[in-house]
Image (cartoon, grey):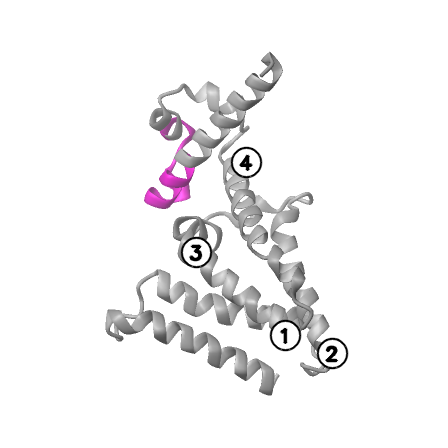
Amino acid sequence: MGITERKEREREEMRKLILDAAQTLFLANGYEKVSIRNIADTIEYSPATIYLYYKDKNELLYALHQRGFVKMVSEFQSLRSLSDPFERLVEMGRAYIRFAVENPELFDLMFIMTAPMDKLDKEDWVEGDQAFGLLMTIVQECMDAGIFKKHDVQATSMMIWSGIHGYTALFLRKRLGMFPECDRQPIMDEAFDLFCKTLRHGL
């Protein structure tokens, strides 16, 4: 490995170290209560070191969201092999739930943690748009195929996403205490199946 490659690897390792620490602190203490110095103390470097990689806390938050959406969208890649658009939609929902269950802290940061989302309004933030854009594409294909009636594709996609997201968040946040613990996962699975059947026959 040459000097250039080694330096780039070291920079990537430092970025990961900073982001991991920021994610842990944001989730534990809340975005507003965490400072660059807190993050620097956690990784035992000076704040100046962090500023070599990220100009401020907002850019750190942006990078964490970017990391999360890149990972989530990668989970959707296998959907390309499915020719039926409704089947793709169902499997996208399953992939979304699986991503949340397997990456609860990252999912929390992306969708649940209170943070100044207006600070993430960047024209080049393609990762978040890509995820919702993929959903809208599949919904439009369902409409074109006559599976769904013609509705506004953005509103329909928002309705589908919010439905799946809602009970996924309830499950992750342990808000299903009215059910015995052994029944929660089966109930969640059945709720998803019922939701999909409702979409198929009622939308």
Q: Disc 2 or 4, which lies upstream in sequence?
A: 4
Q: Disc 1 or 2, which lies upstream in sequence?
A: 1
Compared to 149, does 141 lie above or below? above
List the residue tagged with mark 2.
145
The label number, if any, that marks residue 59 in the structure image: 4
Q: Disc 2 or 3, which lies upstream in sequence?
A: 3
Residue farthest along the left direction in this orientation? 180
Q: Quadrant of the N terminus?
A: top right
The label number, if any, that marks residue 112 in the structure image: 3
The residue under the point 64% across, 45% down is 125
Q: Disc 3 or 4, which lies upstream in sequence?
A: 4
Q: Amino acid at mark 1?
A: Phe
Q: CA distance from mark 3 to mark 4?
A: 19 Å
Percent across and percent down for residue 175 are 31, 67
The label number, if any, that marks residue 86 in the structure image: 1
Q: Give yes or no for residue 85 being in the magenta stretch.
A: no
Q: CA distance from mark 1 to mark 4?
A: 37 Å
Percent across and percent down for residue 4 are 62, 15
Is 11 displayed left or right of 109 in the figure?
right
Percent across and percent down for residue 13 are 48, 26
The residue under the point 37% across, 45% down is 27
Q: Secondary structure at mark 3?
A: helix
Q: Give yes or no for residue 34 being in the magenta stretch.
A: yes
Q: Secondary structure at mark 1?
A: helix
